[in-house]
Image (spheres, rainbow, N blue to C red):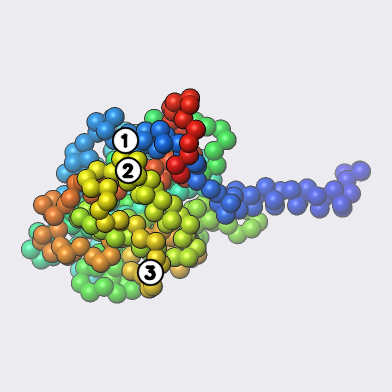
């Protein structure tokens, strides 16, 4: 030991190193959303109109049968990867082969990250495969082409604010999208015939240390502030319940965003119509791609319409079943939620001081 270096000093150094290593994931427990003025709320909610980006133009390429392992599945996968790459996001894939009732099938999850160097992530996720039917006529517009398009849309319309956030030296949480392959069962839903992609990715991230060589046994799952999973979205009058006590405050943030949008005339259609985000907790839950992460103690917000849309797992789950006014409103809620969570910047009037959220 060098002269003058005492055991007490060594203990202090070790403590400081451990404290520094722990802080990056402990911060998520004290994370709070950004308070917004009415003008800031309006700018994030109406960015979609200002940019004149067509949601349908992003959705249409996904509205094809896209069963895992099929050529159409690959087409949609490349479409998603190219769109996110063109926006400047980092692209990773998790490719693997698994046994199914139809034999061995190749699967590939898509992971896109705004700033891969940032330790923590707000993760939005959905599945991009569609369910197998012998007739090969199932589009799965709500299940889950619309959620895929909503995520692509958010990244597009918030591009400037997200890029500014990416360059901000002080930020320690970024936005990550995961598009799961193989959510659907090929035959009968079971522990081994469903959730192929999410089961594989959750297990992979659990055994991938982060930071490399850390002494606290933290892994890639610890990088997830929470997983916000979108599913069965696109028909009129959906209801989204709070399934988890640990994220009840974040579900309540979605409730408050909807209320604020309705009260400030930013809601398309009837602002006095049925609310989508429910305040009462739901009992039980729905088996979905969040489950392998929930089993590994990742916090979950599950945005799935319950009861399920009437077109669920029928040939009628196509574009004709969609209500684009509802989708536009849900896009606004999701945009504001992401902006508040990430503390995104926008230009607001200097005299805008009243905080709506």
Distance, label 2 to label 1, CA atoms, is 7 Å
Q: In terms of depth relative to the viewer, which is nearer, 111 or 331?
A: 331
Above-or-below relation of 194 to 343: below
The kind of secondary structure element at disc 1 is: loop
Q: Earlier in the sequence, mark 3 or mark 2?
A: 3
**Circle 1 residue:** 46
Q: Quadrant of residue 314?
A: bottom left
Residue at 91 percent of width and 43 percent of height: 3
Distance, label 3 to label 1, CA atoms, is 31 Å
Above-or-below relation of 14 to 283: above
Position in image of residue 11 (x %, y %): 81, 53
Would residue 74 be found to the left or right of residue 166 on screen? left
Count the labels in the image.
3
Position in image of residue 246 (x %, y %): 50, 63
**Circle 2 residue:** 332
Q: Earlier in the sequence, mark 3 or mark 1?
A: 1
């Amino acid at each position: 030991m060098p002269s003058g270096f005492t055991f007490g000093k060594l203990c202090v150094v070790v403590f400081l190193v451990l404290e520094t290593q722990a802080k990056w994931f402990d911060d998520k427990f004290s994370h709070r959303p950004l308070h917004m003025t009415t003008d800031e709320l309006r700018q994030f909610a109406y960015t979609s109109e200002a940019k004149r980006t067509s949601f349908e133009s992003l959705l249409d390429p996904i509205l094809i049968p896209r069963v895992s392992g099929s050529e159409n599945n690959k087409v949609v996968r490349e479409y998603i990867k190219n769109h996110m790459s063109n926006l400047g996001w980092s692209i990773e894939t998790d490719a693997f082969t698994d046994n199914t009732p139809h034999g061995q099938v190749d699967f590939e999850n898509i992971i896109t990250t705004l700033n891969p160097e940032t330790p923590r992530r707000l993760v939005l996720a959905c599945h991009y495969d569609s369910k197998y039917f012998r007739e090969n006529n199932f589009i799965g517009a709500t299940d889950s082409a619309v959620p895929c398009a909503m995520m692509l849309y958010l990244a597009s319309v918030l591009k400037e604010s997200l890029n500014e956030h990416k360059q901000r030296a002080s930020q320690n949480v970024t936005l990550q999208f995961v598009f799961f392959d193989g959510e659907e069962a090929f035959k009968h839903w079971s522990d081994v015939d469903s959730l192929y992609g999410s089961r594989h990715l959750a297990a992979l991230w659990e055994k991938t240390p982060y930071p490399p060589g850390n002494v606290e046994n933290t892994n890639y799952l610890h990088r997830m502030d929470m997983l916000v999973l979108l599913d069965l979205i696109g028909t009129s009058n959906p209801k989204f319940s709070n399934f988890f006590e640990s994220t009840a405050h974040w579900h309540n943030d979605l409730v408050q965003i909807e209320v604020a949008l309705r009260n400030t005339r930013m809601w398309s259609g009837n602002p006095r119509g049925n609310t989508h985000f429910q305040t009462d907790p739901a009992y039980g839950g729905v088996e979905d791609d969040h489950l392998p992460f929930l089993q590994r103690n990742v916090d979950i917000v599950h945005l799935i319409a319950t009861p399920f849309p009437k077109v669920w797992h029928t040939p009628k789950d196509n574009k004709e079943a969609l209500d684009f006014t509802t989708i536009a409103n849900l896009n606004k809620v999701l945009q504001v939620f992401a902006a508040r969570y990430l503390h995104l910047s926008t230009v607001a009037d200097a005299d805008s001081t009243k905080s709506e959220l």
